[in-house]
Amino acid sequence: MYHLRGVTKTYRRGKASVQALDGVDLTIEDGGRLVIQGPTGGGKSTLLQMLGGLDRPTAGQVELDGTDLATLPEARLTRVRSESIGFVFQSFNLIPTLTAQENVETALVPLKLKAKDRRERAAEALGSVGLGERRGHLPGEMSGGQQQRVAIARALVKRPKVLLADEPTGNLDESMRDEIMDLLEGLWKEHGLTFVMVTHDSAIAKRAPRLATIRKGRLTVTENASA
């Protein structure tokens, strides 16, 4: 479970300061699903970075299962990210010279698993996203949708409890967008993940049971009874 209390993030830009988050309070239950929307520069990605321990707040607490990510020593924070949090990004972030199998295995290196275990888990993860027969292909030999499936497999191969996605369908056409969202929603239910996603796409936002709207660093959360 996430508990955010008074989370503020201020960036310095020369002599000026920009407040990306302004006293955000938020609770996300285990297994919950939340979509974050808002204008460009409103604080969406900054909030996701706080949830993932990729950045630290200027003030406030970001608790995951009672542990404040904002104050953890860097080594412990890295361990939490490696074990408990999976990330999916708009740009896929695959290594072009590695096969799909090898890209997925990279997520397991920090866990110090044996090579055999890494291979087996990566193959299983790729199978779960429908790419079992494409394990030996390079990213450049796959479509955008297939590359995003590899990225999803990489996020899930470490068996995290949290999945964070930043515009995961932003580079895809409408039909592929729907395919990827169906996949993500199915994996969320299957694995009991806590799933938080940033998107500009209102069609995607309508599918989520909870919607957080962030403007000028201030957050409003609404329940979506139709989702």
Image: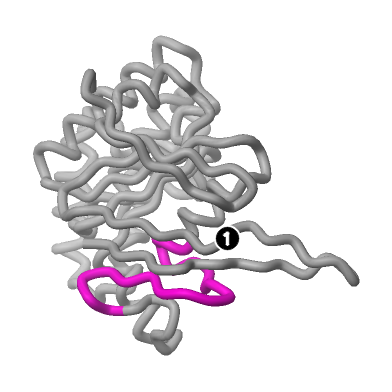
Magenta-colored stretch includes residue 56: yes
Residue designated by label 1 = 22
Q: Residue furthest right?
A: 15
Instruction: Examine the rendered structure and indicate whether residue 219 appears above or below residue 8.
Output: above
On the question of residue 95 being in view, the answer is yes
Disc 1 crowd rating (10 Å Cα; few below 14, some 14-19, many 20+) is: many
The magenta segment: 50-67
Q: Residue at x 25, y 41 (%)?
A: 33
* Count of residue discs: 1
Quarter of the C terminus within the rendering: top left
Quarter of the N terminus within the rendering: bottom left
Q: Quadrant of residue 185?
A: top left
Q: Say which amino acid is labelled 1.
A: Asp
Task: Specify whether 99 is left or right of 49.
Answer: left
Task: Specify whether 209 is left or right of 7.
Answer: left
Q: Quadrant of residue 83?
A: bottom left
Q: Residue at x 33, y 73 (%)?
A: 110
